[in-house]
Amino acid sequence: MKKIQQHVERLFQDLPETDEVVQVKEEIIMNLEEKAQDLMEQGKNEEDAINKTIVDFGDIDEIKAELQGTTTPAATKPRKKTHPKLNLLFSIWGSALIIALMVFMNLEYSPQTIWFVYPTFAILWWPLSMYFHWLKQGGRKA
């Protein structure tokens, strides 16, 4: 279990040794050792159990940021790129194809009743909402 302690020490090496950091490290070590012990009880050998525990633990960037008292500002977080114009064009083409399918089905299977108009109104909400999203994101800038 010394390998788990060394791993946790390596993860926290760039943080100052405050009481809070020491407490968090001890808690993490205790939890990881319990998990490794559970894996050994399930039949894994000690080395495999420790390695699996370390791999499953993952990244501690959020814990480190919280312990440092600084959360990552919104400006440095990667922003999800949106493509409002592409979304608008996709919604227009998709709606046109769905409406064309509805017209075909209506004319082919029940030409005496014109029912394709009703789903058309529902389908047109998709490009309409994408249009307003595009405008909100700065569309029509000349």
Image: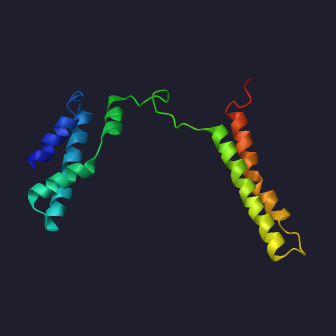
Image location (x, y in percent) of residue 92? 72, 48
Question: Which quarter of the figure has residue 110?
Answer: bottom right
Foreground of the two, 35 or 114: 114
User: For the image shown, how many numbered marks are present on the structure?
Assistant: 0
Q: Residue 129 location, x and y as percent?
A: 73, 46
Q: Going 67% across and 33% down the picture, which residue do you hit?
A: 137
Q: Is residue 105 left or right of residue 87?
A: right
Q: Residue drawn 76% across and 52% down?
A: 125
Q: Is residue 135 above or below residue 5?
A: above
Q: Which sits in the foreground, 62 or 133?
A: 133
**Considering depth in this image, is 49 or 111 the residue closer to the camera?**
111
In which quadrant of the rendered image does the C terminus lie? top right
Q: Taking 20 as reference, is 89 left or right?
A: right
Q: Quadrant of residue 23?
A: top left
State the residue at coordinates (78%, 67%): 104
Name the quadrant containing residue 89.
Answer: top right
Q: Position of residue 141 (x, y in %)?
A: 72, 25
The residue positioned farthest toward the top in the image shown: 142
Q: Is residue 90 left or right of residue 64?
A: right
Is residue 138 shown above or below 58? Answer: above
In the rendered image, residue 102, in percent from the top left (x then y), is placed at 77, 65
